[in-house]
Image (cartoon, rainbow, N blue to C red):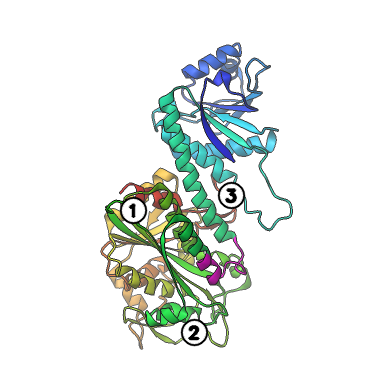
């Protein structure tokens, strides 16, 4: 969908539908809206004051006819809710609702948006334009690659109107940023939605290689023989039951100027998780093509970072393999020596993600980063605790955790800190090795985090459990059913703020 900015009066907007907003608790028209109202003979004022069904509540809407008095065919009057509560994240949600409604119920191809709610003072013009654009682009995403009938949107063009050149420049910057972020989200969602038959370790490593080439990134792809020499033993154990060879990918964005910080992003890359010999029930395998969501997320983030070009060095790492049952699979009771020398007793082959991450965390330490952030669809326990719309966050640096939670809040992505205590290590005790790969049925998400902590020496490590948030079974706010691209917005903004 083509989204652009045009400096023009609302009265001159040539489109099928012009979207303007009013607050529930302050129905005062802006100067631009007053001019529009005057051109329509006070019709907008009549709707706001006299129309019983329209109160200005959040996402309320009313179609106002224009009777050919202005170039726009019709006006969509939308409620912004209460003024103090109208944030840029609420605007993302509202824009998504509006574009879906226009697409489904009205025969429109060209839409104009005013800078909805910018008069509240809760955000500036750039944030406003970015939020409108994000809502539209996220809401109109659809994975229809394998459908004969494509679900194309009727709406082809969206213009955001401004009434001065300063706001025009700021709005264009906001739209550009939204396009970069949403393009990265689409890339990530496409990869997660792709069936496992096509999204194999080899295929994804090739995608990563092409991404690196296209974006001018440094990249390396390591094969099984190289990984054996690098002592990626826990990772290789997980992948040894599959017909597909494991791959380890490392992409790096390095700024032209001296980097202010160095950040390492690690994404879990299980391209299909059957559970291994501890095989999952059939219903539990239905969405296991998404167990590489962490990998897809870090690739999406580095795509966005390469376009935004901050003075921050960013590395994206992922160990890619399938967890499959076969005559060569790793087994319960096996003892594996991790890259850092610690031994692990395999208590359950379906607790494989933490094993693949263990070696990558140790590898990440060698990069001497300021922050190490791992992202993984790691535990069902996190879904039980937080549901499908809240990401679990834990780690060993409270300041970094707080910063990421705040960035999530600013982007409309909820995160909640889960604890890691040293004595949780007791839950991982083994009689025959340094530790087991599972604990008891209690505190599963936190115990998994404690397991990972054994494999990094970083004093600034964060673990993000996206088991619930990477893929949802029903629409939520601006997000459609399926892959969400969660944390692309949060972590990109976190890096950009350094």
Magenta range: 194-206
Q: Residue at x 29, y 72 (%)?
A: 423
Q: Is residue 203 magenta?
A: yes
Quarter of the view holding residue 365: bottom left
Label 3 packing within 10 angstroms: few (<14), some (14-19), many (20+): some
Mark 1: few/some/many CA within 10 Å (<14, 14-19, 20+) = some
The answer to whether the residue labelled 2 contacts the one labelled 3, judged by CB atoms less than 8 Å apart, is no
**Residue 218 is drawn in which quadrant?**
bottom left
Q: In which image quadrant can residue 139 be found?
A: top right
Circle 1 or circle 2, nearest the eye: 1
Q: Nearer the viewer, residue 97 or 296?
A: 296
Residue pointed to by mark 2: 330
**Disc 1: which residue:** 255
* Mark positioned earlier in the residue sequence (2 or 3): 2
Visible residue check, residue 414: no
Which residue: 33% across, 68% down?
Answer: 364
State the CA–CA distance, disc 1 to disc 3: 34 Å
Q: Nearer the viewer, mark 1 or mark 3?
A: 1
- Whichever of labels 1 and 2 marks the residue nearer the N terminus, that label is 1
Q: Is residue 256 left or right of residue 75?
A: left
- Of residue 249 and residue 361, the one placed in the foreground of this image is 249
Give the spatial CA distance, label 2 vs label 3. Answer: 37 Å
The x and y percentages for residue 33 are 52, 19
Residue 180: in magenta span = no
């Amino acid at each position: 969908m083509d989204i652009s900015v045009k400096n023009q009066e609302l009265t001159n907007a040539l489109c099928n539908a012009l979207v303007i907003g009013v607050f529930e608790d302050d129905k005062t028209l802006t100067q631009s809206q007053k001019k529009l109202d005057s051109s329509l003979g006070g019709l907008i004022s009549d709707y706001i004051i006299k129309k019983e069904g329209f109160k200005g509540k959040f996402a309320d809407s009313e179609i106002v006819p224009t009777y050919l008095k202005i170039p726009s065919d019709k006006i969509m009057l939308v409620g912004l809710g209460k003024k103090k509560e109208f944030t840029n994240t609420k605007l993302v949600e509202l824009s998504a609702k509006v574009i879906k409604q226009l697409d489904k119920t009205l025969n429109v191809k060209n839409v104009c948006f005013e800078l909805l709610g910018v008069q509240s003072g809760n955000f500036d013009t750039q944030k406003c334009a970015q939020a409108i654009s994000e809502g539209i682009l996220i809401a109109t995403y659809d994975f229809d690659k394998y459908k004969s009938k494509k679900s194309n949107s009727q709406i082809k063009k969206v213009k955001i109107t401004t009434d001065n050149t300063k706001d025009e420049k700021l709005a264009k910057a906001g739209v550009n940023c939204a396009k970069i972020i949403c393009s990265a989200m689409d890339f990530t969602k496409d990869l997660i939605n792709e069936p496992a038959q096509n999204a194999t370790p080899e295929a994804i490593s090739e995608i990563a290689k092409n991404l690196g080439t296209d974006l001018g990134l440094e990249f390396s792809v390591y094969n099984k023989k190289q990984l054996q020499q690098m002592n990626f033993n826990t990772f290789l154990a997980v992948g040894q039951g599959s017909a597909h060879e494991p791959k380890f990918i490392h992409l790096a964005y390095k700024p032209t100027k001296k980097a202010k910080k160095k950040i390492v992003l690690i994404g879990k890359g299980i391209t299909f998780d059957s559970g291994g010999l501890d095989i999952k029930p059939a219903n539990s395998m239905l969405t296991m093509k998404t167990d590489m969501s962490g990998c897809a997320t870090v690739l999406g983030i580095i795509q966005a970072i390469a376009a935004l070009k901050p003075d921050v060095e960013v590395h994206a790492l992922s160990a890619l393999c399938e967890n499959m049952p076969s005559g060569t699979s790793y087994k319960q009771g096996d003892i594996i020596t991790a890259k850092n020398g610690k031994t692990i007793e395999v208590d359950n082959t379906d607790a494989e993600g933490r094993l693949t991450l263990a070696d990558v965390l140790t590898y990440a330490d060698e990069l001497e980063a300021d922050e190490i952030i791992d992202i993984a669809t790691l535990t069902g326990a996190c879904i039980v605790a937080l549901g499908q719309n809240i990401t679990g966050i834990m780690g060993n640096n409270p300041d970094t955790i707080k910063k990421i939670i705040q960035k999530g809040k600013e982007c409309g992505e909820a995160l909640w800190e889960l604890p890691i205590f040293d004595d949780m290590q007791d839950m991982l005790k083994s009689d025959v090795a340094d530790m087991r790969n599972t604990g008891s049925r209690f505190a599963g998400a936190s115990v998994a985090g404690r397991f990972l902590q054994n494999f990094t020496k970083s004093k600034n490590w964060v673990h993000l459990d996206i088991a619930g948030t990477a893929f949802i079974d029903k629409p939520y706010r601006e997000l459609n059913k399926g892959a969400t691209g969660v944390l692309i917005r949060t972590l990109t903004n976190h890096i950009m703020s350094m």
